[in-house]
Image (spheres, rainbow, N blue to C red):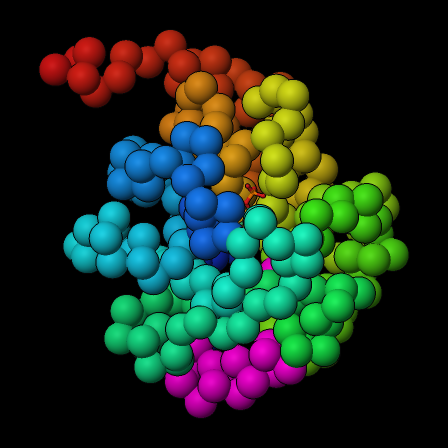
Amino acid sequence: MDWGLANRMARMFSPGSQNSVMLAVDHGYFMGPTRRLEDPRATIAPLLPHADALALTRGILRTCVPPSTRTPIVLRVSGGVTVLQEDLSDEDITVSMEDAVRLNVSAVALSVFVGSPHEHSSLVHLSELVDQGEEAGMPVLAITAVGKELEKRDARYLALACRVSAELGAHMVKTYYCDDFEKVVEGCPVPIVVAGGPRLDSDQAALELAHHAIALGAKGIDMGRNIWQSDYPVAMLKALRSIVHEHATVGEAMDILTQEKARPSRATVA
Ligand code: 5RP
């Protein structure tokens, strides 16, 4: 791995645990103003200091994130379709590598749609992006998108999608947690981070998901809705950090969540 690419990778993963807590706020690129992400600036600001990386689009980066931030950026560079379409897989590359470099991001991310009508083009886009990434020293994160068919999220499917992404040169893969998740990890030679998916029944359920994923070999999380749709997003992010970086149990993480919930907000302290 070239020094520049390795350096960008290292920015996102803690030198201690070698894991990463990425905060995903890129949902608007196909879902519009998602609940509790209607005002991205307000959602992002309190969470930004607690994330190891922030995953978003260039429009939200340029308008809602201060350029003084030290938090590494994972830039989504695929898009072109919205939830109004039945088939979400018809994505193209929407950002040039030149602009990603200009934005000084730490990685670029695109969705791959294995098994979907546009499987071929999404995998070719991944390969082309890896060529450009190797040239520019820019890591590429492949996101194994499942479109609207959530039932596809079994280990057989996700192992296939992750392995294909790694074979085509992705430097990291974002996927979903599933039963037999260790089989997904086993077949994928690059780091895997897990998304949370739609909001679960409780904060505890999201902590359990993260705990299982890390215990079975994930190198981190890249989670959105289960953090910022929680009533206590900062507390939730801190509790998740304890799992990802300190191998806290779910019980220990719940204790952190409870303590953090009890903390007065900055507005109250002032
Ligand atoms: C949207 C994405 C999201 O970044 C990813 O799904 C993580 O967010 P969440 O935890 O809310 O699922 O890739 O396409």
Q: Quadrant of the C terminus?
A: top left
In magenta stretch: residue 269: no
Q: Nearer the viewer, residue 32 or 128?
A: 32
Q: Which residues are magenta?
A: 124-145
Q: Is residue 81 above or below residue 35?
A: below
Determine the residue positioned at 28% across, 12% down: 264
Depth check, front residue: 167 or 78 = 78
Q: Position of residue 27 (x, y in %)?
A: 48, 47
Of 110 and 255, nearer the camera is 110
Using residue 200 as the reference point, say whether residue 57 is left or right of it. Answer: left
Can I make out residue 212 in this image?
Answer: yes
Q: Position of residue 163 (x, y in %)?
A: 76, 69
- Classify residue 111 as left or right of residue 29: right
Please name whichever residue, 13 or 16, is drawn nearer the observer in this view of the structure.
13
Q: Is residue 158 above or below residue 90?
A: above
Q: In the current view of this chain or complex, which residue is farthest to the left? A: 270
Image x and y of residue 269, in percent: 17, 13
| Residue lying at 69% horizontally and 64% vertically, measured from the top left | 113
Q: Is residue 6 above or below residue 25?
A: below
User: Does the magenta-highlighted stretch encompass residue 135?
Assistant: yes
Q: Is residue 173 visible?
A: no
Q: Give residue 145's quadrant in the image.
A: bottom right
Within the image, what quadrant is residue 211 found in? top right
Q: Residue at x 66, y 78 (%)?
A: 121
Position in image of residue 247 (x %, y %): 60, 37
Q: How many marks?
A: 0
**266 to the left or right of 38:** left
